[in-house]
Amino acid sequence: MQKPLFQKIYLTDQKSFNILKVNRPYFVVPWHFHPEVEIMLITKGTGTRFVGDSIEDFGPNDLVMVGSNLAHVWKNSLQHYEASSGLQAEARVILFREDCFGRDFFNIAEMERIKNMLLKAERGLKFFGNTASSVKNKIMAAYEQTGLERFISLIHILNELSQSKEYVTLSSIGYIQQIQTSDLYHLNVVLDYLLKNFKKEIKLEEVSKLANMSPTAFCRYFKSRTNKTLIQFINELRIGYAKKMLVESRDTISTICLNSGYNNISNFYDHFYKITGKRPSQFRDEHHNKLIAL
């Protein structure tokens, strides 16, 4: 298998930016980074989003800005890989370099808020609420436009995002990216394995073999690249899946615990609270109450 390098983005016809439509049974781009700023709007599909050291579920209307050279990947849930599922993964993606409109474009006074937002986006930004709804409509409209109209729409999109307080930062404040192009092959192999097997017992020896390392060397390597231990990473995958099941199913918490990869209900409760700050029953009730309010 050819080792993936950092993602090279080609802007067709020498365009300064682009808006793409992705529509597939599942997203195929591996864990990668590139100089371009990326705005990712999910319109169909579910799965797990990795931005820097952030691990979160995603679904329709998920709106995220990823700064220049920040490692990221959207991995669909396992159902998307079943040929009979009929599921689709669809997104609109905006890509632009910070100097694509001229070296000093974002340095003029009128662009100060946008420039500050792009600095924050170096850790990844997730937008929600009225901002996400409004910007979604603008992105969908901009995709249908061309030329100057599309350029003006992009500025409106960036302006609205820069003025919003409805966002959270994704990567932790202490995250320092150490992922190099040569790391991406090993990390993608490990990531795919963990996503397919997190419900089972995962042995360090098996994972370290995938990276062609000893267990001790792999632990150091994985922590330096993801800012998490392997156990922390697996627990976040498992709790992310449990959150999804608490929302989408009527299964008991004990059943969800087992189906998420835990064989000890006490450990499940401890990890769930540590990661979410809530008990599983509280998380489920709060989400259902939000749906009723809508």
Image (cartoon, rainbow, N blue to C red):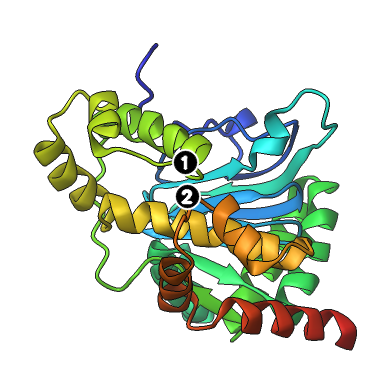
Q: Is residue 173 above or below residue 183?
A: below
The residue that appears at 76% across and 57% down in the rendered structure is 60
Q: Quadrant of the N terminus?
A: top left
In this view, the residue in front, 223 or 267, is 267
Q: Amino acid at mark 2?
A: Arg
Mark 1 — residue? 200
User: Residue 208 appears in which quarter of the rendering?
Assistant: top left
Q: SS for tag 2?
A: loop
Q: Is residue 63 visible?
A: no
Is residue 122 toward the left or the right of residue 148 in the image? left
In this view, the residue in front, 69 or 259, is 259
Q: Is residue 19 visible?
A: yes
Is residue 211 toward the left or the right of residue 106 in the image? left
The residue that appears at 49% across and 67% down in the rendered structure is 265
Relative image position of residue 225 (x, y in whole percent)? 24, 48
In this view, the residue in front, 130 or 101, is 130
Q: Residues within 10 Å of mark 1 (few under 14, many from 20)?
A: some
Q: SS for tag 1?
A: loop
The residue that appears at 13% across and 46% down in the rendered structure is 220
Relative image position of residue 134 (x, y in whole percent)? 79, 73
User: Residue 121 appears in which quarter of the rendering?
Assistant: bottom left
Q: Amino acid at mark 1?
A: Lys
Which of the two discs, 2 and 1, sits closer to the camera?
1
In this view, the residue in front, 115 or 167, is 167
Q: CA distance from mark 2 to mark 1?
A: 41 Å
Mark 2 — residue? 97
